[in-house]
Amino acid sequence: MVSSSFVYFRKKYMLIPLVIEMMIVLVIISILLLIAVPNLAKNQSMASEKGCEATKDLIKAQYFAYEIDTGNKPESLSVLEDQKYVDTLKCPDGSTVTLNDLGL
């Protein structure tokens, strides 16, 4: 018959490989997070830049559409918003687009 102290000893030391495996998994997850998080931040800023460029291109196209429709250049971009040529004059980052930004 096996003594109870031996059973306790055996159960106690059977947990050691499990704990080591868990530590290895945590280290691997930490390394993956260290690689992924900076890339996510970089992609976020790039997406914001591209969103603003796309907004400027849209407003510029609508500027010329207004000019073709009316025969006159708009005095300001707010005219495009008032006449429902564009929904907003703001980039996704919150900055307002001006005529100077469009190069007009």
Image: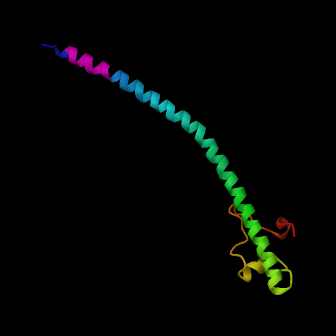
Q: Which residues are magenta?
A: 5-14
Q: Residue at x 82, y 86 (%)?
A: 70
Q: Place residue 71 in its image quadrant.
A: bottom right
Residue 96 seen: no
Side of 91 where 102 appears, left or right: right
Left or right placement of residue 7 versus residue 40 in this view:
left
**Majority secondary structure in the magenta region:** helix
* Residue 103 x, y percent position in the rendering: 86, 66
The colouring scheme, among rainbow, by chain, secondary structure or one colour, is rainbow
Image quadrant holding the N terminus, namely top left
Specify the quadrant that holds the C terminus: bottom right
Task: Tell me residue 78's x, y (percent).
Answer: 77, 77
Quarter-of-image position of residue 84: bottom right
Q: Quadrant of residue 77?
A: bottom right
Which residue is located at x 71 percent, y 58 percent?
A: 50
> Position of 63 compared to 3: left or right?
right
